[in-house]
Amino acid sequence: MSASSGAGLSEALHDLPAQYRDLQAEAASLAQAVAGAADRADESSAVDPEMREQLAKSGLTALLVPAAYGGRSEVVDPVAATVVREVLAGTSSHLDSLFAMQGIGSLALGRAGDEELRRRWLPRIATLDAIAALALTEPGVGSDLKAITTTVREDNGSLIVDGHKSFITNAGYADTYTVLGREGDGFSLVLVPADSEGLSTSSPHQIIAPHVLGDVVMDGVRVPAAHRIGPPGGGFPLVLATLATFRVSVAGAALGVAQSALDDAVRYTTGHSAFGAPLHRLGSIPQQLALSWTEIEMARAFTYTAAAAAAQDPGASLHWSSMAKVGATEVAGRVVDRAVQVMGRAGLTRGTVIERMYRAARPMRIYEGGTEALLDALARRLVATQQ
Ligand SMILES: Cc1cc2nc3c(=O)[nH]c(=O)nc-3n(C[C@H](O)[C@H](O)[C@H](O)COP(=O)(O)OP(=O)(O)OC[C@H]3O[C@@H](n4cnc5c(N)ncnc54)[C@H](O)[C@@H]3O)c2cc1C
């Protein structure tokens, strides 16, 4: 079996090692089981109970925490996360996000959290009994994280957290928030349980591809000092470690969306005719289909190469993960656009797979590193290596 979703109509070149093909089949079986709920869940800004239940039952979220705390591998494996996200995102972006956030919201805890806190939270996150979230973004701060205004200060063995986090996936549904705040001259990560006094959530933003998203306000929230993850001022290396493991998995999700859109376009253009010929033989349509296929296969080969590099040494391969994320999400943007175009009005109709994939592809070029911000960092590295 290839690295494509398995449901795909196109054959695919890139082959995965056997252990990942098994994982792909496992994810495909979950995707198949929830396919009927995808439309509803992807229109919702609330966690879909059926999706949550089926995902929990699948055991896949155990891939996202270390084995010592109920996980399936000694350390979180970026290839596994990428394989699963490709399959899940091809069916439902809601399901993909619910899966991925368990790792993105908990990697820092698993890497550097207090032992007692790890034992309390990680096994529950592994089983989806508890939902995790990562809170970096603020109303006035996105990519430029060093400009955040949330503060952390120590007071008599406690940490006091004050601030406003915005556009946080799972806000309102998470049991625990990993929050980045300014502590003195540095930045620290703090684990803030959702039921902490002074923490409130709201959902002021609705986006074009509905997402479980909200704001988190912390007003004098007090947690034990042991809730600081890592040393005081040690927040950024842990954020980077999170990105080094999971950024490449966004590329996987983008491939799933792109493949699903292409499959839909092939199905439609072979099943409909105009001017006496099937659409797939008309004008530029064959070129558009073939170009999408070519771009997906190139992005897939690169994504899994970058994921393997991230599995070897996540810190040393963040630039490859960034390239994979930029490449695959930009490909997905082009593929969904072509798919809508070749399907004509059918591609625009609300409630169809292609319309859902068209919208799902768009935020991927913005979150977890906007394309331009990533290209900026890549260009700096490129120039530095040639000087
Ligand atoms: C669906 C979704 C889920 C999200 N979930 C979370 C979450 O769980 N937790 C969380 O903390 N945040 C989350 N976010 C927020 C996300 O991380 C930010 O949107 C992202 O960091 C970009 O910030 P911004 O939107 O403020 O854009 P900005 O940073 O203002 O960027 C605007 C534009 O400028 C470009 N740009 C930025 N910096 C540079 C640069 N140095 N050089 C060149 N161009 C640049 C960007 O690429 C973009 O095109 C989510 C966002 C979305 C859409």
Image: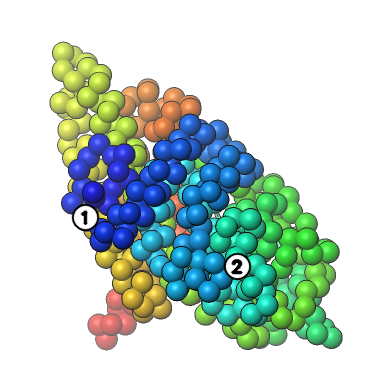
Q: Quadrant of residue 377?
A: bottom left
Tell me where residue 77 appears, x and y as whole percent.
40, 67
Task: Name the residue beneath numbered marker 1.
Answer: 14
> Which residue is depicted at the point 48% across and 38% down?
34
Please, what is the three-letter code of the amino acid marked with disc 2?
Leu
Mark linked to residue 145: none
> Which residue is depicted at the point 50% across and 54% down?
59
> Which residue is depicted at the point 22% across and 37% down?
289
Quadrant position of the C terminus in the picture: bottom left
Of labels 1 and 2, the one closer to you: 2
Q: Identify which residue, 235 or 48, lies in the foreground.
A: 48
- Dot 2: what SS? helix
Whether residue 193 is visible to the viewer of this picture, yes or no, is: yes
**Residue at mark 1 to residue at mark 2: CA–CA distance:** 33 Å
Judge whether 331 appears above or below 133 on screen: above
- Dot 1: what SS? loop
- The total number of labels drawn is 2
> From the viewer's perspective, is 68 left or right of 290?
right
Q: Quadrant of residue 282?
A: top left
* Outermost residue, top side: 276
User: Colour scheme used in the picture?
Assistant: rainbow
Tell me where residue 127 appears, x and y as whole percent.
57, 57
Please, what is the three-letter code of the amino acid marked with disc 1?
His
Whether residue 239 is visible to the viewer of this picture, yes or no, is: no
Q: Identify which residue, 318 or 334, lies in the foreground.
A: 318
Judge whether 160 appears above or below 285 on screen: below
For marks 1 and 2 on the same chain, the one whose residue lies earlier in the sequence: 1
> Which residue is depicted at the point 46% across and 38% down?
33
Task: Name the residue beneath numbered marker 2.
Answer: 122
Q: Quadrant of residue 385?
A: bottom left
